[in-house]
Amino acid sequence: MKGPGFIRPREAEGAVQAALSSRQKVKMRIVSILLLLMIALLARPAAAFDANAVSALVFGDGEEQVAAIAALVADGDARAAKVLEALAQGELKSSGKRILIVRGGTATDALSGEVLPAVPADSEEIIANNRLRRELAGGIAALKLVSPDRNTRLAAAKELSGGADAAMLPLVTKALDREGDPAIKAMLEMIVAAMEIKSSDRELRFAAIRRLASSGSRETKTLLLGVLEKKDGAWVETDADLRAEAEKSLRAVEGKLVWGERVGLAFAGISLGSILLLAALGLAITYGLMGVINMAHGELIMIGAYTTYFVQNLFKLHAPGAFDWYLLCAVPPAFIVAACVGMLLERGVIRFLYGRPLETLLATWGISLVLIQAVRTVFGAQNVQVENPAWMSGGVEILSNVVLPYSRIVIVAFVAVVLVCMWLLLTHTRLGLFVRGVTQNRAMASCVGVPTGRVDTMAFGLGCGIAGLAGCALSQIGNVGPDLGQSYIVDSFMVVVLGGVGQLAGTVYAALGLGFANKLLESWSGAVLAKIVVLAFIIIFIQKRPQGLFALKGRSVET
Amino acid sequence: MRAGPIASTLARLYGTRGWVSLGLCALLLFVLVPLGNLVTPADSAVHISTYWVTLIGKIMCYAMVALAMDLIWGYCGILSLGHGLFFALGGYAMGMYLMRQIGREGQYKMDMPDFMVFLDWKEFPWQWWNSDQFWWAMLLVIAVPALLAFVFGFFAFRSRIKGVYFSIITQALTYAAMLLFFRNETGFGGNNGFTDFKRIAGIAITTPQTRVALFAITGAALIATLLLARYIVTSKLGRILAAIRDAESRVMFCGYNTVNYKLFIWTLSAVICGIAGALYVPQVGIINPGEMSPANSIEIAIWVAVGGRGTLVGAIVGAGVVNGAKSFFTQAAPEYWLYVLGLLFIAVTLFMPRGIVGLYAQLRDKWTGRAVA
């Protein structure tokens, strides 16, 4: 019955304690816990700051401390919150019989609020063990429920909905009465119901289960499933009516969850599709329009990502204040660097291999190996850290079980912008006209004075620049390392092949379709199997329609 | 009278010089290397260490793959970026048998292979049926790559998928297979694959004698493959293949069904890869899904390109040179190997379209051409 190690040696009581037999000690402890509980219950309606509980928290042993936390939480007093937070932060100290909150070198008496001239030399920290810390976290959250700040209350309610101790029921009910905000109120109602479902009052449990039906969160589902649990073939819950009620509520909750999952799935599909599209857009130009197999495309994505990393580091070094804007500033360099590398490649290597696609494939593969190793030499073989700017972290909560991360939303929007820009470039500019002309009939274009060589270089640079943009975006959601490009190359080729060569619209449909198909299959069969199934599907599909979804009609097909 | 056709066939394959050099190679592989490794003392100058035996054995397996690649790429114009898959499938078929041969000597001292014990499987999955029989393993080594290649090729060639499209799809195929084999549920040891082999056909696998025997078998297989390939490319079939490579439409207009020819050479090429993989695994002692990675398959193409496409000897030379350089660099300067390999890809495609074997002819043409002009 010796308490765990967190009990502070209590020198003052040492002599008395030694005189008592161990059995007496046990008795005394039980009595004191009972007393504390009574005090806690009595203190609740009065809502007064309970000095006894505070001293029990400081000087008591494990059980007493837990009881004291419950008592302080039931109080709902702001000063109690301060004491609990101080304990959680390790700022609660004792000096003789006084209890102090020491923060930043100034000591405040926890009971009277009096500021001491100096921190007493004999002050000792109160150490909280793990169990106490858990209790503290729950208690502090409960106390925050009555805070005047809406966001604090919302955060606290969210924390409590993960699972709250039944002892906090009175406080949560009190907070519920006071709450004005409908969103928080709904959450609190669910919390109360979750607590009441475990109570011993049958009517209360019925009411709670009925109320849970209007919730749409996973926690509620687990809670209701708990009522319907079976152990060794027998129901854990013996009350059949209660079970029937729980089943009804469960169905209602599941109905709502399914909707959330559908929305989540749809967004995941769009998100993956947009990433595939971004990775494949550049390829759609270099392969689709120009017929150049660029196996180094993935490495140009990687170069874009590393450019973003470089810009990020520049901001960290020279303009830490504007760090949040580094990503926007990284977009043009990512495009330019990748485009320059691409144009260099086109001038240096690929130009000599036009009309020999298989050789182009091998040469660009060689280029990709060199680029990977070059990045390893410069930046190291390890993944580098690219941080999200503050405005990209977090997300929008649409339903209780669907959170759309801002980073994904930003990328979807970014892809849309890039797509529109590219479409405008190809259809409304002179360069676009030239590119389309050279694609359709190189010799004729050359005859009417299109500088085909320069157009090739520009178009290739454009495709590579878009790969750089893709790298900039992908750096925000995945690891950035030398092998980054390798993981996208097969996927992006699949998109282009499926969409049909020479067609931007085909690429868009193929990317979104593949994204959806992948996510849909993933929810059934797991990520790896989904990918295999999708690849197998593409292989079979290509057998049926070798020219892709949107085949070019006419003479250009023959080439 | 019966000697006539055989003699003429032999003469068709290689001239006297060719046969003599082939005989010298056979002498080297079957007599000198075994003697150098087993008989001579370890400190003598002519001793060939086990490291070299294993390395050359490995490279000979690669050379078989290169021959297979040369048959379809060099002679039929089909660039496969998925030949690593057939190689790995042959290796896995052999690996299954070798895993069963471990018996109870694994880490867990159980009847099942270690990874199955680890995954808490109680019985063998269906893929492992009969896998303790050597003849069954041999059958799988040939049948699995052949079947996959036949089915895949049938649909691909029938739909007239060719050129780069075909390359990319074969790459997707090997990529998908790699993902599949990475899964524990597939039943082939997940990403660790098979390793820790103890014996083959009841004989301990790590003794020098077994290694030399495997080495000699690989050498024999390589020479047999070379002769078979030579037989094919000098036959009428070989000429049709070359014609398909150069102008497929015209061959079709002449009344040939090109699908059958392509399908035959494609399936044969896959089978050769499977056999090479089966010889590779006991010598190297490990097989895992990494062998199926697209990068490995694309490397096979560069062996052939470096040696010289459309010349069978070139494929062997290319495999030897590239892999020799690889084992040199990965030991001496591992950070430079990718540079070398990458630049090799670029340089060979840009400047050496005929590879090492054709380098002399290329330089001579250039020189004389310039001299004429």
Image (cartoon, coloured by chain):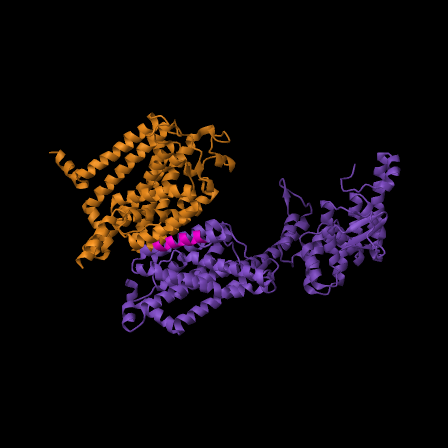
Chain colours: A purple, B orange
Q: Which residue sits at x=42%, y=63%?
A: A340
Residues shaded magenta: A362-374
Q: Position of residue A331 (x, y in %)?
A: 50, 65
Q: Nearer the viewer, residue B277 or A120?
A: A120
Does residue B165 appear in this view? Answer: yes
| Vertical relation: B194 (above or below) A118 | above
Q: Nearer the viewer, residue A46 or A189?
A: A46
| Vertical relation: A407 (above or below) B205 | below
Q: Position of residue A390 (x, y in %)?
A: 60, 62
Q: Nearer the viewer, residue B280 or B325?
A: B325
Q: Which residue sits at x=89%, y=38%?
A: A16
Q: Quadrant of the N terminus of chain B?
A: top left
Q: Position of residue A158 (x, y in %)?
A: 67, 57
Residue farthest along the left direction in this orientation: B1
Q: Is residue A214 left or right of residue B343?
A: right
Q: Quadrant of the C terminus of chain B?
A: bottom left
Does residue A549 appear in this view? Answer: no
> Magenta stretch: dominant SS?
helix
Q: Position of residue A183 (x, y in %)?
A: 67, 63
Q: Is residue A512 left or right of residue A19?
A: left
Q: Nearer the viewer, residue A79 or A196?
A: A79
Residue A386 on the magenta span: no
Q: Is residue A237 left or right of residue A40?
A: left
Residue A373 on the magenta span: yes
Looking at the rendered structure, the number of numbered marks drawn on it comes to 0
Quarter residue A262 falls in: bottom right
